Image: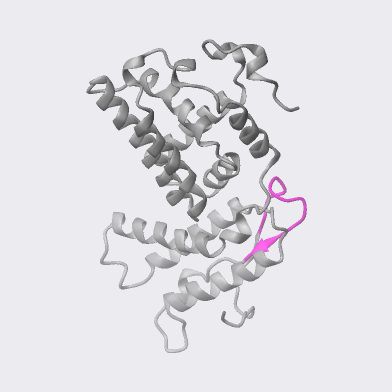
Amino acid sequence: MLKNERDDISKPIVIPSSLNNSKRIITKPKEAENTIMKKSTPSLAEQAEQTLEDTIDDIVKLEEDCLMADSLKEYFKELKKLIKTEKIIKRFSKEEIETISVELENHILYKLYDKLYPLKFSKMDNKFYKKCCRLKFIKPENIITDKNIYNEHLWKFSMDYLNEINKKYTPKDKLKVVLKAFSILQNSITFSSGKKELGVDDTIKPLIYVLIKSQPQNIFTNYSYCQLFLNDNLCKTQYGILLTQLYMIMNIIKDMKYTDLIGVSEEKFGKDED
């Protein structure tokens, strides 16, 4: 790691009190006007590396569970401005510059993953996992009325794929796993039912079933991480829609009662922990 130089840093960003009770700071990238080509002026790569080193140094001082979403997003905005000032970048299209920015964000989140992603899972994660384990006895017919779409063999691939989410480090890559798992399920429903187009009613209950049977151990933590750090522009794409859909399904399962299932008694369903 480069030696941390603090002689020429811009005004620090203070983390909002809503994210942390005490004041924590990370440094902004150097201002765009400092990027004029001079022999003594660091290159874009050197500036980006130095500001990343400064950011890592600041985050190391924080508590493990402190999430600095607002501050990091502000940092990313400043870094994007810095990128646009480089002569070599000006020849690229707006879409190409956005791609560069997103990939740079992903690289930084990858480097900071063990500082941003909680080492201990939340109480909500544990309750959700225990509930899914308790409901492992359910069959498709306990949730889904249309027998034409049953295909547990193919659905197993979707369940297995969902559990790959913990092997990914950026919000985009984690959501890619969820997207792939959901796509496998939807394709199997299309194949089994013979329908060319599927509505929400065709997919929502199978998705609930698959999520329960996959027994995810930290789904709420993963959701929170993606919701906090997903690139703002990606939130407007299929990834944002997927994040909303995942949250809805998680809460349906969290609030599920025995009366929501078919042919399951209250005794067999059991009780949720307080």
**Residue 62: percent from the left, percent from the top?**
71, 61
Q: Relative to residue 268, is residue 204 drawn left or right? A: left
Residue 244 vertical position relative to residue 30 in the rendered view, above or below: above
> In the picture, residue 190 is in which quadrant?
top left
Q: Is residue 5 above or below residue 203?
A: below
Residue 242 visible, this angle? yes
Total marks in image: 0
Stretch in magenta: 14-26
The residue lying at 40 percent from left, 60 percent from top is 103
The quadrant in which the C terminus is found is top right
- Magenta region, main secondary structure: loop
Residue 238: image location, x then y, percent: 37, 38
114 magenta-colored: no
Residue 127 sits in quarter:
top right
Q: Which residue does the image show at 35% across and 15% down from the upper left?
A: 147
Across and down, in percent, residue 25 comes to 67, 62
The image shows residue 173, relative to residue 160, as above or below, that is: below
Name the residue nearer the viewer: 187 or 156: 156
Q: How is the image coloured?
A: one colour
Question: In the figure, residue 90 lies in which quadrant?
Answer: bottom left
Q: What residue is rendered at 25% in x and 27% in y?
A: 191
Left-right relation of 171 to 148: right
- Nearest the eye: 109 or 178: 178
For residue 16: magenta?
yes
Front residue of this view, candidates 161 and 43 = 161
Is 57 above or below relative to 113? Answer: below
Location of the N terminus by quadrant is bottom right
| 196 to the left or right of 37 | left
Residue located at (68% from left, 50% from top):
120
Q: 261 left or right of 106?
A: right
Residue 55 on image: x %, y %: 60, 67
**Residue 10 appears in the picture as rendered:** no
